[in-house]
Amino acid sequence: MTSIQVRPAGPGDHADLAALHEREWGGPHVVVHDTRYDLRELPALVAVDGAGGFAGALVHRLADGGLEVVSLAATTPGNGAGSALLAAAEAVATAAGADRLWLVTTNDNLRALRFYQRRGLRIVAVDAGAVDRARTVKPTIPYLGEDDIPLHDELRLERRFPAPAAGS
């Protein structure tokens, strides 16, 4: 496996980010928990491989005492970029004084559910019908998701951080 490094996105990453978001989400807009986000307007972390090649990205926002992962995608699954990006996002969260990292995925995304749970995130809520509502804002959301599973619901996952030690 190639060594993965993570850094904040810079102006030179715009084309790679745009291509990744087009591939993953059909463009720069995502609709999650009844909110439409433009991924170009939020902070991003990028993963690069040992040769300096673009390996993935995580777009996030700090709000409500936590860091929300709005988008996470690797150029090649299994290359270590997702794990490295998630660890870097936790570092951003703790540096900002946040006590949790959280995100939303869909009921069909079994690969993501496995990935996140293996990294300590827990399912804390299910919003039945959230994807159905999101289609009114973004009609290109498919009705069938991965493995031909009907796409209807959002699952919220989170991991809480231990409180910093006194005096640190």
Image (tube, grey):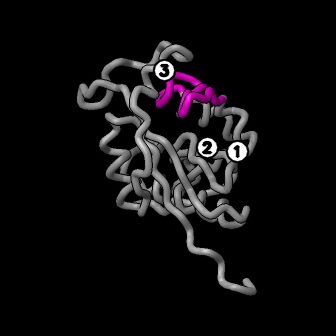
**Could you tell me residue 35's position as x and y percent?**
61, 29
- Queried whether the magenta region covers residue 73, the answer comes back as no
Disc 1 residue type (three-letter): Pro
Residue depicted at 37% across the width and 45% down the height: 112
Q: Earlier in the sequence, mark 1 or mark 3?
A: 1
Side of 126 relative to 32 (left or right):
left
Give the quadrant of the C terminus.
bottom right
> In the figure, is residue 156 to the left or right of 8?
left
Residue at (35% x, 47% y) in the render: 113
Mark 1 residue crowding within 10 angstroms, few (<14) / some (14–19) / many (20+)? some
Element assignment for label 1: loop
Distance from Cα at disc 1 to Cα at disc 2:
6 Å
According to the image, label 3 marks what residue?
Answer: 133
Eye-nearest disc, 2 or 3: 3
Indicate the quadrant where residue 141 lies.
Answer: top left
Amino acid beneath label 3: Arg
Nearer the observer: mark 1 or 3; the answer is 3
**Residue 51 picture location, percent across and down:** 54, 55
Which residues make up the magenta segment? 22-37
Which residue is denoted by mark 1 in the rendering? 43
Q: Earlier in the sequence, mark 2 or mark 3?
A: 2
Q: CA distance from mark 1 to mark 3?
A: 26 Å
Q: Position of residue 81 (x, y in %)?
A: 48, 53
Q: Which residue is mark 2?
A: 59
- As measured in the structure, the alpha-carbon distance from the residue carrying label 2 to the one carrying label 3 is 22 Å
